[in-house]
Amino acid sequence: MQNDSNSNNMIIEFKNVSKVFQEGAGDNLVDVSFSIERGEFVSFVGASGSGKTTVMELIVGATEKTKGEIIRPKNTIMVFQKDSLLPWLSVLENVILVLLNEKISEAEKIKIAHEKLALLQIEKLADKYPHELSGGQTQRVSIARALAVDPEVLILDEPFSALDEKTKEELHKDILKTWKEHDLTIIMISHQIEEVVLLSQRAFAMSAKKISAEIEIPFAYPRNAEDEMFMKKIVEIRRAL
């Protein structure tokens, strides 16, 4: 059974979900259950092969469960770690690309694309091409493109791992600002525990194809990585992995 989200607050729910791949085809999941409320910022953290990506593929419908029940919204979009911009299109054209099937005028598509680029502070790059962008600019364009379809859920797959520290810090601020101002539900995949504590309200620690712990991160924003409670939360998550 697989449904659209039908609760005022709960937007995603997994009930005893398992996924078994043919050998070498993906990371299996075993009896995974969790729920995410509308407007939350949650993260899935764990080592490579722990099943994080499989959970995200199930949420977006890129793969099918073997058993269990999944409740999810239709309008979910994923931003990947690797550059997914088309090199022969300009920045503006890359953003417009996701709107091709929308029943709106060309002028409206261009307007939306410019608005999302402005939101990520990169409207001045509209006429540039992907090879002219830095790593941070490329990720901003990818996020702007994802936001153009007005998703209910934005999934970030290791979005900051290839960036330098200064760019990463700037993007953290942009993501939090976008989340707070646009009533988004954000799910982040990461193996960086400090990043998870810095950004998330809750973390699901994954180990051995299962969720090993659900950890609340109840700190106000902005967060201080040198705070004692921040450090204790890092230790708590590390122990759960």
Image (cartoon, rainbow, N blue to C red):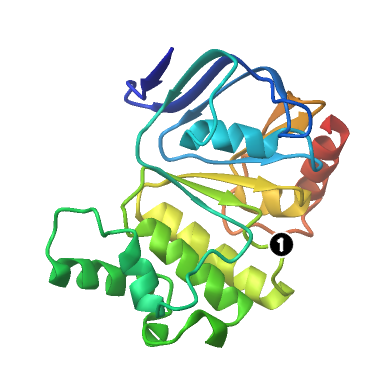
Residue at 16% from the left image edge and 69% from the top image edge: 106
Picture coordinates of residue 115, whole percent (x, y):
29, 71
114 on left or right of 58: left
Answer left or right for 166 relative to 182.
right
Q: Quadrant of residue 65?
A: top right
Closer-to-camera residue (51/86): 86
Residue 175 visible in the snapshot: yes
Reply above or below: 20 against 128: above
| Side of 51 where 231 appears, left or right | right
Residue 145 picture location, percent across and down: 40, 63
Name the image quarter holding the N terminus.
top left
Residue at (75, 58) in percent of width and height: 225
Q: Which residue is label 1 attached to?
A: 161
Does residue 118 appear in the picture of this structure? Answer: no
Residue at 29% x, 75% y: name it.
Answer: 114
Q: Secondary structure at mark 1?
A: loop
Residue farthest toward the left in the current orientation of the protein: 105
Left or right: where does residue 103 sit relative to residue 112? left
